[in-house]
Image (cartoon, rainbow, N blue to C red):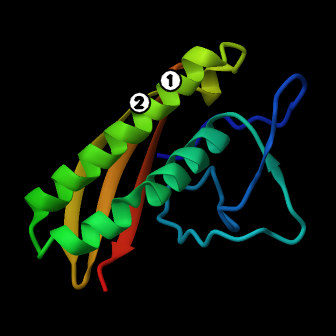
Amino acid sequence: MAISNTTTDYTGRTVDMYISGPLDSASTAAQSVVYSFGNPSQYIAGVQKLVQRYVISLINSGFIEALMGGVNNNIQSATHIFNLYSWNVILAFKTYQNNNLNQSLDEQLSTVQLTNVAASGDSVNFSAQLITKAGDTVQFVLPLPLN
């Protein structure tokens, strides 16, 4: 599912640097994500900012290390590890949101639900659905190599 609403009016918002590469947020096709600072750099806000922050937080949570050390080609283990680390990220976001009540609803996380896990060679693909407090729903795939 493509992101249907993106924010271009940054009035009264804090903005993040967009580091998710040259993605087309309106496209429903799978796209590769390469985290780097673009040239020229762009700002983002709204649901794009939230998705980027969630993925970065998940990757930096120790999730990858736990996944590489504990999967052994077991989808159930991969699912458990994702849910455990994702829940910790969700709790951290909710704590932050409760302490910073001035955020726009499209930049506040309601939940993330894992919708599918599939192994493909030496990688695993996590499909998830992120829901904002504004009610926006974004589907994304997080493909991770296991070597």
Residue 67: which quarter of the image? bottom left
* Residue pointed to by mark 1: 95
Residue type beneath disc 2: Leu
Q: Position of residue 56 (x, y in %)?
A: 55, 55
The front one of 81 and 110 is 81
Question: Which residue does the image show at 63% across and 69% down from the upper left?
Answer: 35
Q: Position of residue 110 (x, y in %)?
A: 45, 24
Residue 124 in sight in this render: yes
Residue 132 in sight in this render: no
Q: Position of residue 140 (x, y in %)?
A: 44, 52
Residue 73: which quarter of the image? bottom left
Query: Could you say which disc has been placed on residue 31 in the image?
Result: none
Question: Which residue does the image show at 27% across and 52% down from the upper left?
Answer: 82
Helix or strand or loop: what does disc 2 sit on? helix
Q: Residues within 10 Å of mark 2 (few under 14, many from 20)?
A: some
Q: Is residue 2 above or below residue 56?
A: above
Q: Is residue 81 left or right of residue 30?
A: left
* Residue pointed to by mark 2: 91
Residue type beneath disc 1: Thr
Q: Is the C-beta separation of discs 2 and 1 under 8 Å?
A: yes
Q: Is residue 48 above or below residue 82?
A: above
Q: Residues within 10 Å of mark 1 (few under 14, many from 20)?
A: few
| Quadrant assignment for the C terminus | bottom left
Q: Is residue 13 left or right of residue 31?
A: right
